[in-house]
Image (spheres, rainbow, N blue to C red):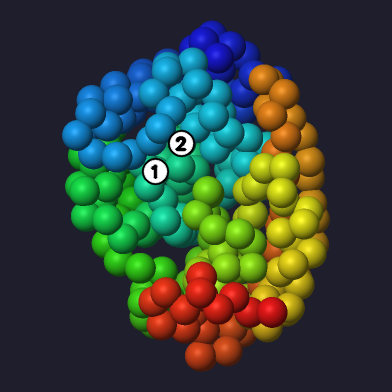
Amino acid sequence: MTIDEFILALKNASISLTEKQVQQFEQYFNLLIKTNEHVNLTAITDKQEVYLKHFYDSLILAHYVKPLQNESKTLIDIGTGAGFPSLPLKIAFPQLKIVMVDALQKRVNFLKEVVELLDLSNVDIVHGRAEDIGQNNSYREQFDFATARAVARTSVLAEYTLPFVKLGGEFLVMKGAAAEQELADSKKALATLGGSLVKSFDFKLPNGDQRYIQIVSKVTHTPKKYPRQAGTPSKKPIQ
């Protein structure tokens, strides 16, 4: 996906970028590739692949979740890695208030560098594990949206994310081909943690890759025992 194809594909999804925003994506890409030489941020380094599989794939979330585009919503991105999907969303929709969580200090340092380079405001970068931060009252049940990309299967991901979502807020599940099976396997976890599936969308990226976005509403408070201590959700998923 060339830059022109990126801009056009977003327009077709009713998402428009300013010249400044297009430039910010270029700066983001350049810093990503430069930093990736000595910090493991992404296995995808080809420019057209980054624009398709990282930038476009992150932004298409806002096509299906319209409040991300024009409301001052809060979003927490768990295990954000190199900043996907939250940083592309922040660049395109500057009114969003973003918190990015990652357990690796080197990735946190990179994210801070991107935020400073692009002069982004209302961005908080937190170094730590979701299981620990999810028990912190400063973050617990404080967010309109929580999401995570390429972190874990949905039953595990639910325990990482739903504790951060306020009542009436939404857990945004971004998945590939295994999405429906993972969702079926996560029914007990979602119910236990206070979530209920309200919408599901399936579509293909311009290259034909299958994608799913599943919207889980927070309908009851997450019991205080969740998230459990670090490492437990992945070793013993709620079943």
Can residue 40 be seen from the camera position used here?
Answer: yes
Figure quadrant of the N terminus = top right
Q: Mark 1 or mark 2: which comes first in sequence?
A: 1
User: Nearest the camera: 199 or 45?
Assistant: 45
Residue at 23% in and 28% down: 37
Residue 220 visible, this angle? no
Tag shown at residue 88: 2
Looking at the rendered image, the quarter that the C terminus falls into is bottom right
Which amino acid type is marked by label 2? Pro
Q: In the image, what residue occupies the spot 49% across and 16% down?
A: 48
Rate crowding at label 1 as few (under 14), some (14 to 19) or many (20 or more) other CA atoms within 10 Å.
many
The quarter holding residue 208 reads top right
Q: Quadrant of residue 87?
A: top left
Question: In this rendering, which labeled residue sits more in front, label 1 or label 2?
Answer: 1
Q: Residue furthest front?
A: 235
State the image quarter where residue 102 is shown.
Answer: bottom left
Q: Does 198 appear above or below 113? A: below
Kind of element beneath mark 1 = loop
Residue 16 location in percent, x, y? Answer: 58, 23
Q: Nearer the viewer, residue 171 or 118?
A: 171
Using residue 2 as the reference point, say whether residue 192 is left or right of it.
Answer: right
Q: Name the amino acid, label 1.
A: Gly
Q: Nearer the viewer, residue 131 or 238?
A: 238
The image position of residue 105, as x and y in percent, is: 21, 55
Horizontal and vertical percent position of residue 154:
64, 62
- Residue at 62% from the left image edge and 40% from the top image edge: 62
- Position of residue 115 in the picture relative to residue 60 (left or right): left
The residue pinned by badge 1 equals: 83
**Residues at marks 1 and 2 touching, judged by CB atoms closer than 8 Å:** yes
Rendered view: 164 above or below 41:
below
